[in-house]
Amino acid sequence: MAEAHPQITKKKEYPSENNKLLQEQQHPLVSSTKTKRRFCLSLILAAAATFPTATRPSLLSSSALSTAMAADEEDPQQQQQPELHLERYTDINEGFTLLRPSSWIKVEKAGATVLFEDNAKNKGTNNLGVVVSPVRLSSLGEFGSPQFVADKLIQAEKRKESTKDAQVIGVAERLGHGGLQVYEFEYKLDSTRGGMKRIFSAAFVASKKLYLLNIAYSDRPENPLDISTRMTLEQVLHSFDTAAML
């Protein structure tokens, strides 16, 4: 009669923390996810630091344009806002260029690569800032779609203690110099710092750097953003590109 062999129960092995770390480093999906998290953090920090050659899309639809123009005609007070004249600004060292209001002055602020403010009105509420920071991705497309990035920006705004509300108005994508992917966003921001504002943002990745443009302009109920100024700010938005285009 054959002898009965005792049942052997294998002890379940749990990977050590070092083994887990090694697995994560060797797994391309995990590595990619961590890179995206770092990119997301860079995007959020850049948004917080600023105050905010193809056919270029407009963030303003034709129906919204007609409505806004009709509102301007009915409210003559809106037409009294000063016209913004633009001039080109180029940062050769960081590698970007854009149009900016010639009357706005350049100021220094920690975290901003460059910042221009309209000191003649609203004590700096109207401003334009650019932040450049290193990333590991080669393009915005590796991080996500324009809508995905817009959602991240809005989440970053809503996490600020000063934010009362933030709502996306428009999201677009265009091609910059050499087919560069450029994402554009427009949203409303209600904050305890400066009240209600309209924010225009553009972002692209070039040479392993994230470039983020933020334009903030007062948009209060008693003095809303007029169509002429809005179209000028969109012109600034569309002009944001690498300095290689020059």
Image: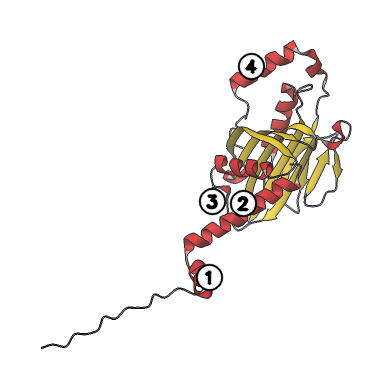
Mark 1 vs mark 2: which is more N-terminal?
1
Front one among 199 and 113: 199
Residues marked 4 and 1 touching at CB (< 8 Å): no
Residues marked 2 and 4 touching at CB (< 8 Å): no
Mark 4 lies on a secondary structure that is helix
- Could you tell whether 115 is left or right of 141 in the image? right
Q: CA distance from mark 1 to mark 2?
A: 22 Å
Residue 9 on image: x %, y % = 32, 78
Amino acid, disc 4: Ser
* Residue in view at x 80 percent, y 38 percent: 193
Number of numbered discs visible in the structure rendering: 4
Q: Residues within 10 Å of mark 2 (few under 14, many from 20)?
A: some
The residue tagged 1 is 21
The residue tagged 4 is 66
Residue 44 on image: x %, y % = 67, 49
* Residue in view at x 57 percent, y 41 percent: 146
Q: Residues within 10 Å of mark 4 (few under 14, many from 20)?
A: few
Residue 70 on image: x %, y % = 68, 13
- Could you tell whether 167 is left or right of 117 in the image? left
Q: CA distance from mark 4 to mark 3?
A: 36 Å
Amino acid, disc 3: Glu
Front one among 222 and 199: 222
Q: CA distance from mark 2 to mark 4?
A: 36 Å
Front one among 224 and 146: 224
Residue 20 visible to the viewer:
yes
The residue tagged 3 is 142
Residues marked 4 and 3 touching at CB (< 8 Å): no
Looking at the image, is 4 positioned above or below residue 144? below
